[in-house]
Image (cartoon, grey):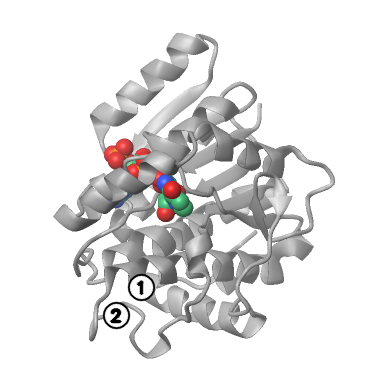
Amino acid sequence: MKAVVITGASSGIGFEIARLLSKNYFVIGIGRNENNCAHAKELIYSENPGAKIEYFIADLVQQKEVNRVAYEIQTYLENNDILELYGLINNAGCVRSWYTTSEEGYEQQFALNHLAGFLLTYRLLPLIIKAKGRIIMTGSQSHKGIKICWDDIMLRKRYNPLTAYKQSKLCNILFAKGLNDRFTSAGIRAYVVDPGLVRTDIGNKQAGFLVNLIWSIRKKYGVSPEIPAKTYEFLLETNPAPKGLYYCSCNEKTYSRQVTSENADRLFLLSEKLSGISYDRLEC
Ligand SMILES: NC(=O)c1ccc[n+]([C@@H]2O[C@H](COP(=O)([O-])OP(=O)(O)OC[C@H]3O[C@@H](n4cnc5c(N)ncnc54)[C@H](OP(=O)(O)O)[C@@H]3O)[C@@H](O)[C@H]2O)c1
């Protein structure tokens, strides 16, 4: 059975992806909260008692936690004879109302929405290449109309939480492009899904009063997370692999003109430096 790792699989879009994919894949979910993960697992089992699903707990804002959980997942796959890690879905994300940092001193939206996926992908890439698999990031339409602030990517000097969120979502597409530029020849593909406006609690967690209020109103106009989940299944299962980069509702979509090879390379190098890794040194 093919396995797929999904981050942020305890609620919202990630949970619905886990629920959908658990029909055909061994799902390995990552969440930060033990109770939410246990509840998610229970719900999936109650609908599908034969589902193969396991949850791992990690606060993916922190790089040491990303490294730890990646190691635990590799060990789990080996011990359970799961030979094919076909998919990695970097979906966990957050919004913040003010400047907060990870233990490494990285702005939290940048750390979770981009760097966690960058580092987790690095750790799991040899297995995904072996399976000629696919990597999918959860992006957002909000990546448009913004540039990467190269001289202050954490926005330390002038923090605006919305700008930080949008920039992290632009990073998702630049990272996917960087992966394709480097590893398509190794048989893998990377994509970004724009889920649209989705009725989840993302803006009601660890955000201030105003963000909470605005999101509570806005999310009423959102679709159910079951809708975007289908696009992830489409990108994993369509053969031959879709050639595009950015998808919404199972259709290719245009993305920002900021998504160039030059910007993708620049972000790749910077993210390697911030994570203390080098994709060139991977033994695949
Ligand atoms: N909702 C939308 O309209 C929308 C639109 C565009 C893009 N997106 C993107 O969709 C993705 C999923 O968001 P969502 O709307 O489904 O939000 P959500 O319901 O809050 O789900 C986020 C998931 O990430 C987990 N998570 C949060 N912080 C974490 C951390 N530090 N370490 C590990 N896991 C963590 C959450 O765990 P808990 O269950 O413990 O909270 C949850 O499982 C995000 O990347 C977001 O940017 C959402």
Q: Position of residue 246 (x, y in %)?
A: 65, 59
Q: Position of residue 91 (x, y in %)?
A: 46, 48
- The disc labelled 1 sits on which kind of residue? Thr
- Position of 284 with respect to 73 (left or right) is right
- Position of 198 with respect to 39 (left or right) is right
Q: Name the residue rendered at 37%, 25% in the picture.
A: 40
Q: Name the residue rendered at 37%, 65% in the picture.
A: 165
Residue 15 vertical placement versus 24 (above, below): below
Q: Position of residue 146 (x, y in %)?
A: 47, 78
Q: Considering only order in the chain, which callout, 1 or 2, is on the residue closer to the N terminus?
A: 2
Circle 2 or circle 1, nearest the eye: 1
In this orientation, which residue lies closer to the viewer: 104 or 8? 8
On the image, numbered disc 1 is attached to which residue? 163
- The disc labelled 2 sits on which kind of residue? Leu
Check the picture and name the quadrant holding the C terminus.
bottom right
Q: Residues within 10 Å of mark 1 (few under 14, many from 20)?
A: some
Tell whether label 1 touches label 2 (CB within 8 Å): yes
Q: Name the residue rendered at 32%, 63% in the picture.
A: 109
Instruction: Kindly report the distance in space between the C-alpha atoms of the residues bearing marks 2 and 1.
Output: 9 Å
Tell me if I can see residue 174 in this picture: yes
Q: Name the residue rendered at 73%, 48% in the picture.
A: 132
On the image, numbered disc 2 is attached to which residue? 155
Badge 2 marks a residue whose secondary structure is loop
Tell me if I can see residue 79 in this picture: no
Badge 1 marks a residue whose secondary structure is helix
Based on the displayed image, in which of its 4 quarters is residue 259 positioned? bottom right
Check the picture and name the quadrant holding the N terminus.
top right
Mark 2 vs ligand 1: CB below 8 Å: no
